[in-house]
Amino acid sequence: MRCKILILLLFTYSFLFSQNEKFPQYPNPVKIPISLSATFAELRSNAFHAGVDIRTQGVEGKEVFAVADGYVSRIGVSPYGYGKVLYITHNDGFTSVYAHMSKFNKMITDFVKDKQYKDESFDQNIMLKENEFPIKRGDFLGFTGNSGSSGGPHLHYEIRYTKTQEPVNPLCFGLKIKDTKKPVIKGLAIYPLENSIVNNNDTTIYLNVNYNEGVYSLDNSIFTVSGDIAFGINVYDQADGANNKNGPYSIELFADNELIFNIISDKYSYNETRYINSLIDYSRYVKNKERFVRTEIDKYNNLGLYETRKGVVPVNQGDTIDMKYVVKDYNGNKSVLNFTLIGVKLHVDEIDDLVYDTESYYEVIDGNPLNITLKDFEMDIPKMAFYRDVVIETTLSDTMSNIYSDYVYHIGNEEIPVHKKATLRIKPKTDYIGDTLLYVALLNTNNEFVFLGNKTVDDYIEAKTNVLGSYLIARDTIAPSIIPVNFKTNSSISENWSLRVEIEDKETGIKDYAMFVNGRWVLADYDAKNKLLMYQIDNHIKEGDNILKVVVTDMVGNKNIYSTTLTR
């Protein structure tokens, strides 16, 4: 289902509105001017953005309201992801989502708090029935915030189909922004595919795009090519009153005025979100942190955002093909980039078929599963783990000190995107078999260990990963740190309204945390990005002396306990 648009000229700029009656028109979820810091289906790390991010004037605490009748169907509380989040199922077939909130309304807050104390857990994922929390359009839900993995105060707002949970662009539901700015085209990539050339070369060329007086252009817009050619474009969009770089609404590519490729950001499925790594030039992103949207579609890429899927242009000697990119935002502002392909004769030297040493290279063909077996190492790669046929090189090295496997296992490289997680097992050095402090680590480009897992399977340590690279066994012997922030050990807290402690584990990360007052578990909000555990003082703190205890455990079981007596 796609938003149908009607172009209306108003005050010298265009607005596009959904004209499809199947999309109900909702009021805004906040009563402040709408300005977006992120758009729907915007390109993120390993995922598309599932909603829009509404700016909240740089602060928390703006009121949030329900956009339609329905009921609260799910409540989430987490130090990661969406943080404090509400899901409201409406009577019209859609569900609205309000994420990164700082606080729910009193009724929901009290309900969640009772559940947290019952479970003795800050983290919650509560599924509710229709009659538990009925909601009317305009009901107060709580306050905007910065909880979870948020990068600053804002409201993440989503609309989903209730039946499928597919996210839909909220701009189709009447959320309007002032936007007179055209999308920005930063770069163009031209990809010669197998046995093809561009400007007498068989490697990709990346070009900066010029902008002058409303027109995008290249230093040289004519390219001599031969064979099958694909393209990539690096773009972003901005709205009035905001400097942040958002994603565009649509990208179209024309060859001699025929539409051969386009994507439209109306809806997608959550099980498609990792296909972003096939949509973009993944290698370029890993190396340069630039996202080029590719027109070549890998044969195992099932992303639904594609509308037209003919993004490869065959060019023969004597051809002249006029190419045109058109990039639009939701309000109809558009930017255009033109260039021309001139077909030339292809001179290809005879190429011998590559023969791979099966002890060093593994081929993944037709989406088949693969088992890689090396000395004291196994890796099970599931079916359809890659977006195309790949060749994975494997090597072993034994020159790294302070590791607890005999080798570092180099499996492919981080420039090969992986769609499904592989399971890997590494056998520790003989003297450390059975050591509970061991874990499988990915060695990143900064030579840092990244925790992957520590499950024991026979004499091996097992983990799962969707990143290729260098793996090893590491050992974490250091317990997490616990540091008081707004009070001192064995001190008076008569002036405090909260108790805050910083908790951190620099190697494997925090697995469990808990705070106790006078031997009883108390609710402490965990803000993982700021490493902060905060308990709002309530009736668990009595007049006189109180014993505070904080217990934090890392991913391999190292535990730290902080205890002190605080006087009120």
Image (tube, helix red, strand yellow):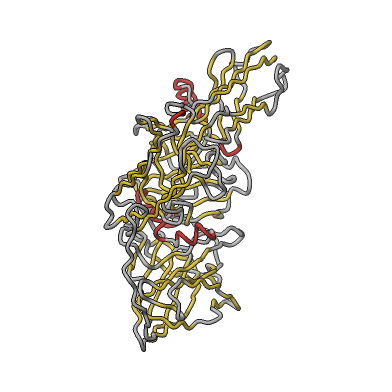
User: x, y percentage for residue 313?
Assistant: 35, 76
User: x, y percentage for residue 138?
Assistant: 47, 42
Q: Which residue is drawn at 54% across and 15% down?
A: 520
User: x, y percentage for residue 246?
Assistant: 53, 59
- Say if residue 202 shows up in the picture: yes
User: x, y percentage for residue 218?
Assistant: 54, 78
Question: Is residue 391 placed above or below 430 in the rendered structure?
Answer: below
Question: Is residue 287 placed above or below 118 in the rendered structure?
Answer: below
User: Where on the picture, by quarter, is residue 427?
Assistant: top left
User: Where on the picture, by quarter, is residue 198?
Assistant: bottom left
Image quarter in which the C terminus is found: top right
Name the one closer to the observer, 247 or 15: 247
- Say if residue 326 shows up in the picture: no
Q: Which residue is drawn at 35% across and 86% down?
A: 317
Image quarter in which the N terminus is found: bottom left
Q: Which residue sits furthest top?
A: 544
Q: In this view, does 259 lie to the left or right of 67?
A: left
Total numbered labels: 0
Q: Which residue sits furthest bottom?
A: 318
Name the one closer to the observer, 262 or 200: 200
Question: Is residue 389 placed above or below 514 in the rendered structure?
Answer: below
